[in-house]
Image: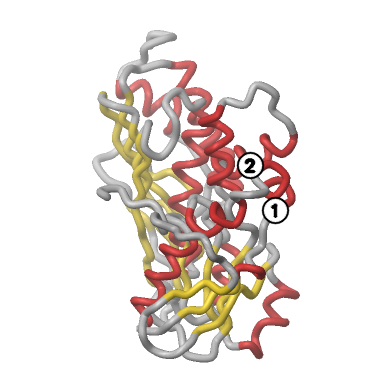
Amino acid sequence: MSDSNPSEFDIIQSFFSDLGHADGATQLGIGDDAAIVRIPVSARLCLSVDTVVEGVHFPAGTAPQHVATRALGSALSDLAAMGAKASHFTLALTMPKSDSRWLKSFAKALHDMAVAFGVSLVGGDTTRGPLTVTVQVHGWLPPDKALTRASAREGELLVVSGTLGDAGAGLRCLQQALSDPNAEVDYLSGRFYCPSPRLLLGQQLLDCGSACIDISDGLLSDAQHLATASNVGLEIDASLIPLSPALQRLFPKQALELALTAGDDYELLFTLPESKLKALQSLSPVPVSVIGKVSGAGQQVSVKGYDLDIQQKGYLHFD
Protein backbone atom coordinates (compact mmCIF):
# COMPACT_ATOMS: atom_id res chain seq x y z
CA MET A 1 0.00 0.00 0.00
CA SER A 2 1.25 3.48 -0.84
CA ASP A 3 1.78 5.52 2.32
CA SER A 4 0.11 8.56 0.80
CA ASN A 5 -2.41 7.25 -1.74
CA PRO A 6 -3.93 3.91 -0.66
CA SER A 7 -6.27 2.04 -3.00
CA GLU A 8 -9.97 1.51 -2.28
CA PHE A 9 -9.34 -1.95 -0.83
CA ASP A 10 -6.34 -0.74 1.17
CA ILE A 11 -8.52 2.00 2.65
CA ILE A 12 -11.12 -0.52 3.83
CA GLN A 13 -8.55 -2.90 5.29
CA SER A 14 -6.29 -0.31 6.90
CA PHE A 15 -8.78 2.23 8.26
CA PHE A 16 -12.25 0.71 8.53
CA SER A 17 -12.03 -3.07 8.97
CA ASP A 18 -12.33 -3.04 12.76
CA LEU A 19 -13.94 0.27 13.64
CA GLY A 20 -16.22 1.00 16.55
CA HIS A 21 -17.77 -0.82 19.46
CA ALA A 22 -17.45 -4.63 19.30
CA ASP A 23 -20.56 -6.63 20.17
CA GLY A 24 -22.02 -10.06 19.58
CA ALA A 25 -24.77 -8.94 17.21
CA THR A 26 -22.57 -8.77 14.10
CA GLN A 27 -22.44 -12.19 12.48
CA LEU A 28 -20.63 -10.99 9.36
CA GLY A 29 -19.15 -7.51 9.08
CA ILE A 30 -16.78 -5.68 6.74
CA GLY A 31 -15.13 -7.69 3.97
CA ASP A 32 -18.04 -9.35 2.19
CA ASP A 33 -20.74 -8.13 -0.18
CA ALA A 34 -23.11 -7.38 2.69
CA ALA A 35 -23.20 -7.51 6.47
CA ILE A 36 -25.24 -9.96 8.53
CA VAL A 37 -26.55 -8.74 11.87
CA ARG A 38 -28.52 -10.67 14.47
CA ILE A 39 -31.64 -8.79 15.58
CA PRO A 40 -32.30 -9.28 19.30
CA VAL A 41 -35.38 -11.22 20.31
CA SER A 42 -38.39 -8.95 20.93
CA ALA A 43 -36.81 -5.96 19.20
CA ARG A 44 -37.56 -3.97 16.07
CA LEU A 45 -35.01 -2.49 13.70
CA CYS A 46 -34.92 1.31 13.52
CA LEU A 47 -32.77 2.87 10.80
CA SER A 48 -31.99 6.25 9.30
CA VAL A 49 -29.53 7.72 6.80
CA ASP A 50 -27.87 11.15 6.67
CA THR A 51 -25.46 12.78 4.22
CA VAL A 52 -23.05 15.64 4.85
CA VAL A 53 -21.41 17.47 1.96
CA GLU A 54 -18.38 19.75 2.02
CA GLY A 55 -19.41 23.36 1.49
CA VAL A 56 -23.01 22.62 2.46
CA HIS A 57 -22.93 20.96 5.89
CA PHE A 58 -19.39 21.97 6.87
CA PRO A 59 -16.91 24.54 5.54
CA ALA A 60 -14.40 23.56 2.86
CA GLY A 61 -11.11 22.52 4.41
CA THR A 62 -12.66 21.26 7.65
CA ALA A 63 -10.30 18.96 9.52
CA PRO A 64 -11.05 15.25 8.91
CA GLN A 65 -11.75 14.49 12.57
CA HIS A 66 -14.47 17.15 12.56
CA VAL A 67 -15.99 15.77 9.36
CA ALA A 68 -16.20 12.35 11.02
CA THR A 69 -17.83 13.48 14.28
CA ARG A 70 -20.29 15.75 12.48
CA ALA A 71 -21.38 12.97 10.13
CA LEU A 72 -21.82 10.24 12.75
CA GLY A 73 -23.19 12.50 15.49
CA SER A 74 -25.92 13.99 13.31
CA ALA A 75 -26.95 10.57 12.03
CA LEU A 76 -27.17 9.05 15.51
CA SER A 77 -29.38 11.94 16.60
CA ASP A 78 -32.17 10.56 14.42
CA LEU A 79 -32.12 7.34 16.43
CA ALA A 80 -32.26 9.38 19.64
CA ALA A 81 -35.38 11.15 18.40
CA MET A 82 -37.08 7.76 17.95
CA GLY A 83 -35.99 6.43 21.35
CA ALA A 84 -33.84 3.72 19.79
CA LYS A 85 -30.72 2.10 21.22
CA ALA A 86 -27.95 2.54 18.65
CA SER A 87 -26.23 -0.60 17.39
CA HIS A 88 -24.53 -0.45 13.97
CA PHE A 89 -23.82 1.87 11.08
CA THR A 90 -22.63 1.81 7.48
CA LEU A 91 -20.46 4.44 5.81
CA ALA A 92 -20.28 5.70 2.23
CA LEU A 93 -17.23 7.93 1.83
CA THR A 94 -16.61 9.97 -1.30
CA MET A 95 -13.26 11.80 -1.49
CA PRO A 96 -11.54 13.89 -4.16
CA LYS A 97 -8.34 11.91 -3.56
CA SER A 98 -6.94 9.10 -1.42
CA ASP A 99 -4.84 10.52 1.41
CA SER A 100 -3.54 8.32 4.23
CA ARG A 101 -2.99 11.17 6.66
CA TRP A 102 -6.54 12.48 6.15
CA LEU A 103 -8.01 9.00 6.42
CA LYS A 104 -6.10 8.20 9.61
CA SER A 105 -7.50 11.25 11.40
CA PHE A 106 -10.98 10.66 10.02
CA ALA A 107 -11.03 6.99 11.01
CA LYS A 108 -9.69 7.62 14.52
CA ALA A 109 -12.33 10.24 15.30
CA LEU A 110 -15.04 8.02 13.83
CA HIS A 111 -13.82 5.08 15.93
CA ASP A 112 -13.70 7.11 19.14
CA MET A 113 -17.24 8.42 18.68
CA ALA A 114 -18.52 4.98 17.69
CA VAL A 115 -17.08 3.44 20.85
CA ALA A 116 -18.46 6.25 22.99
CA PHE A 117 -21.98 5.64 21.69
CA GLY A 118 -21.77 1.85 21.45
CA VAL A 119 -22.02 1.36 17.69
CA SER A 120 -19.90 -0.62 15.22
CA LEU A 121 -19.20 -0.11 11.52
CA VAL A 122 -20.43 -3.13 9.54
CA GLY A 123 -20.00 -2.03 5.93
CA GLY A 124 -20.03 0.73 3.36
CA ASP A 125 -18.41 2.04 0.21
CA THR A 126 -15.59 4.34 -0.91
CA THR A 127 -15.41 6.26 -4.16
CA ARG A 128 -13.85 9.33 -5.77
CA GLY A 129 -15.66 12.64 -6.04
CA PRO A 130 -16.49 15.79 -4.02
CA LEU A 131 -16.06 15.20 -0.29
CA THR A 132 -19.33 13.61 0.89
CA VAL A 133 -20.04 11.35 3.84
CA THR A 134 -23.21 9.27 4.10
CA VAL A 135 -23.92 7.37 7.31
CA GLN A 136 -26.77 4.91 7.77
CA VAL A 137 -27.44 4.13 11.42
CA HIS A 138 -29.27 1.13 12.86
CA GLY A 139 -30.74 0.64 16.30
CA TRP A 140 -33.21 -1.39 18.31
CA LEU A 141 -36.65 -0.46 19.60
CA PRO A 142 -38.94 -2.39 21.96
CA PRO A 143 -41.75 -4.20 20.12
CA ASP A 144 -44.45 -1.88 21.44
CA LYS A 145 -42.74 1.50 21.92
CA ALA A 146 -41.36 4.29 19.72
CA LEU A 147 -41.20 8.06 19.70
CA THR A 148 -42.68 9.76 16.64
CA ARG A 149 -43.54 13.28 15.59
CA ALA A 150 -47.25 12.50 15.46
CA SER A 151 -48.22 11.87 19.10
CA ALA A 152 -48.37 15.30 20.79
CA ARG A 153 -51.54 15.97 22.76
CA GLU A 154 -53.24 19.20 23.73
CA GLY A 155 -52.22 20.38 27.21
CA GLU A 156 -48.81 18.71 27.22
CA LEU A 157 -45.58 20.59 27.87
CA LEU A 158 -43.14 21.42 25.10
CA VAL A 159 -39.63 20.62 26.29
CA VAL A 160 -36.11 20.83 24.86
CA SER A 161 -32.82 19.29 25.93
CA GLY A 162 -29.55 21.19 26.40
CA THR A 163 -29.09 24.70 25.03
CA LEU A 164 -29.99 26.04 21.60
CA GLY A 165 -28.20 28.24 19.09
CA ASP A 166 -24.69 27.08 19.97
CA ALA A 167 -23.94 25.22 16.75
CA GLY A 168 -25.21 28.05 14.57
CA ALA A 169 -23.04 30.47 16.53
CA GLY A 170 -20.12 28.10 16.17
CA LEU A 171 -20.54 28.13 12.39
CA ARG A 172 -20.56 31.94 12.42
CA CYS A 173 -17.31 31.90 14.39
CA LEU A 174 -15.76 29.62 11.77
CA GLN A 175 -17.07 31.73 8.89
CA GLN A 176 -15.70 34.89 10.50
CA ALA A 177 -12.34 33.14 11.06
CA LEU A 178 -11.82 34.86 14.39
CA SER A 179 -8.12 35.64 14.80
CA ASP A 180 -8.14 35.30 18.58
CA PRO A 181 -10.02 32.10 19.54
CA ASN A 182 -11.03 31.83 23.18
CA ALA A 183 -12.93 29.42 25.40
CA GLU A 184 -16.31 30.62 24.09
CA VAL A 185 -15.27 30.23 20.45
CA ASP A 186 -13.86 26.77 21.15
CA TYR A 187 -17.05 25.71 22.91
CA LEU A 188 -19.38 26.97 20.18
CA SER A 189 -17.33 25.60 17.29
CA GLY A 190 -17.13 22.29 19.15
CA ARG A 191 -20.90 22.19 19.36
CA PHE A 192 -21.01 22.58 15.57
CA TYR A 193 -18.28 20.08 14.78
CA CYS A 194 -19.18 17.41 17.32
CA PRO A 195 -22.93 16.93 17.92
CA SER A 196 -23.90 15.00 21.04
CA PRO A 197 -26.81 12.73 20.09
CA ARG A 198 -29.15 12.43 23.09
CA LEU A 199 -29.54 8.66 22.84
CA LEU A 200 -30.00 7.97 26.56
CA LEU A 201 -32.59 10.71 26.91
CA GLY A 202 -34.47 9.37 23.91
CA GLN A 203 -34.65 5.92 25.48
CA GLN A 204 -35.92 7.43 28.73
CA LEU A 205 -38.63 9.28 26.83
CA LEU A 206 -40.10 5.97 25.65
CA ASP A 207 -41.71 5.69 29.10
CA CYS A 208 -42.89 9.27 29.58
CA GLY A 209 -42.75 11.31 26.37
CA SER A 210 -45.17 11.48 23.48
CA ALA A 211 -43.99 13.28 20.32
CA CYS A 212 -40.29 13.94 19.63
CA ILE A 213 -37.99 15.36 16.95
CA ASP A 214 -34.32 16.27 16.90
CA ILE A 215 -33.42 19.88 16.16
CA SER A 216 -31.40 19.82 12.95
CA ASP A 217 -32.96 22.56 10.82
CA GLY A 218 -33.79 25.02 13.61
CA LEU A 219 -36.23 25.17 16.52
CA LEU A 220 -39.00 26.94 14.59
CA SER A 221 -38.66 24.71 11.55
CA ASP A 222 -38.58 21.46 13.49
CA ALA A 223 -41.35 22.58 15.85
CA GLN A 224 -43.46 23.13 12.74
CA HIS A 225 -42.70 19.58 11.56
CA LEU A 226 -43.88 18.25 14.92
CA ALA A 227 -47.00 20.44 14.95
CA THR A 228 -47.96 19.38 11.44
CA ALA A 229 -47.44 15.68 12.10
CA SER A 230 -49.42 15.80 15.36
CA ASN A 231 -52.09 18.21 14.04
CA VAL A 232 -51.65 20.49 17.04
CA GLY A 233 -50.55 24.04 17.74
CA LEU A 234 -47.37 24.81 19.67
CA GLU A 235 -46.83 27.88 21.82
CA ILE A 236 -43.20 28.78 22.54
CA ASP A 237 -42.18 31.30 25.19
CA ALA A 238 -38.96 32.95 23.98
CA SER A 239 -37.93 33.85 27.54
CA LEU A 240 -37.77 30.13 28.44
CA ILE A 241 -35.47 29.02 25.61
CA PRO A 242 -32.19 27.81 27.20
CA LEU A 243 -29.13 29.74 25.98
CA SER A 244 -25.53 28.96 26.88
CA PRO A 245 -23.32 31.61 28.54
CA ALA A 246 -20.90 31.37 25.61
CA LEU A 247 -23.64 32.16 23.09
CA GLN A 248 -24.92 35.10 25.12
CA ARG A 249 -21.43 36.57 25.59
CA LEU A 250 -20.32 36.33 21.96
CA PHE A 251 -23.64 37.02 20.22
CA PRO A 252 -25.77 38.98 22.71
CA LYS A 253 -27.99 40.56 20.05
CA GLN A 254 -28.36 37.50 17.84
CA ALA A 255 -28.54 34.79 20.51
CA LEU A 256 -32.29 34.29 20.48
CA GLU A 257 -32.59 34.36 16.70
CA LEU A 258 -29.80 31.77 16.44
CA ALA A 259 -31.61 29.59 18.98
CA LEU A 260 -34.85 29.84 17.00
CA THR A 261 -33.53 29.38 13.47
CA ALA A 262 -29.90 28.28 13.15
CA GLY A 263 -30.24 24.53 13.69
CA ASP A 264 -27.49 21.90 13.90
CA ASP A 265 -27.78 21.64 17.70
CA TYR A 266 -29.17 18.07 17.53
CA GLU A 267 -30.99 18.50 20.80
CA LEU A 268 -34.36 16.81 21.32
CA LEU A 269 -37.63 18.74 21.16
CA PHE A 270 -40.45 16.73 22.72
CA THR A 271 -43.80 16.84 24.45
CA LEU A 272 -44.89 15.11 27.64
CA PRO A 273 -47.56 15.38 30.34
CA GLU A 274 -46.70 17.82 33.11
CA SER A 275 -47.00 15.00 35.66
CA LYS A 276 -43.96 13.29 34.08
CA LEU A 277 -41.63 16.30 34.09
CA LYS A 278 -40.02 16.11 37.55
CA ALA A 279 -39.22 12.42 37.24
CA LEU A 280 -37.59 12.98 33.86
CA GLN A 281 -35.57 15.96 35.11
CA SER A 282 -34.19 13.85 37.95
CA LEU A 283 -33.09 11.05 35.60
CA SER A 284 -32.10 12.83 32.39
CA PRO A 285 -28.38 12.79 31.54
CA VAL A 286 -28.71 16.33 30.17
CA PRO A 287 -30.73 19.33 31.43
CA VAL A 288 -34.24 19.60 29.96
CA SER A 289 -36.21 22.85 29.89
CA VAL A 290 -39.90 23.60 29.39
CA ILE A 291 -40.19 26.19 26.59
CA GLY A 292 -43.93 26.15 25.96
CA LYS A 293 -47.00 24.00 25.60
CA VAL A 294 -49.19 22.13 23.16
CA SER A 295 -52.32 24.09 22.31
CA GLY A 296 -55.32 23.01 20.26
CA ALA A 297 -55.50 21.91 16.66
CA GLY A 298 -54.30 24.20 13.89
CA GLN A 299 -50.70 23.15 13.23
CA GLN A 300 -49.45 26.65 14.02
CA VAL A 301 -46.26 27.52 15.91
CA SER A 302 -46.30 30.83 17.79
CA VAL A 303 -43.51 32.52 19.73
CA LYS A 304 -44.34 34.75 22.68
CA GLY A 305 -41.92 37.57 23.51
CA TYR A 306 -40.05 37.76 20.22
CA ASP A 307 -40.83 40.70 17.94
CA LEU A 308 -38.29 40.45 15.13
CA ASP A 309 -39.56 39.42 11.72
CA ILE A 310 -37.87 36.10 10.94
CA GLN A 311 -37.84 35.59 7.19
CA GLN A 312 -35.99 32.27 7.29
CA LYS A 313 -37.31 29.92 9.98
CA GLY A 314 -34.75 27.17 9.39
CA TYR A 315 -32.40 25.60 6.86
CA LEU A 316 -33.86 24.53 3.51
CA HIS A 317 -31.64 22.71 0.99
CA PHE A 318 -33.64 23.65 -2.10
CA ASP A 319 -35.00 27.05 -1.09
Q: Position of residue 301 (x, y in %)?
A: 44, 74
Say which residue label 1 marks: 244
Q: CA distance from mark 1 to mark 2?
A: 9 Å
Amino acid type, residue under disc 2 in the picture: Leu
In the rendered structure, the answer to whether residue 167 lies left or right of residue 90 reads: right
Location of residue 316 with respect to 202 vertically, above or below: above
- Drawn side of residue 207 relative to residue 286, left or right: left
Which of these two is toward me, 159 or 67? 159
Left/right of residue 228 with respect to residue 80 in the rendered view = left
Residue holding disc 2: 188
Q: Residues within 10 Å of mark 1 (few under 14, many from 20)?
A: some
Give the position of the N terminus as an image quadrant: top left
**Do callouts 1 and 2 mark residues in contact (Cβ within 8 Å)?**
yes
* Residue 260 position in % (x across, y down): 52, 59
Pick whichever of labels 1 and 2 is earlier in the sequence: 2
| Vertical comparison of 84 with 120: above or below | below
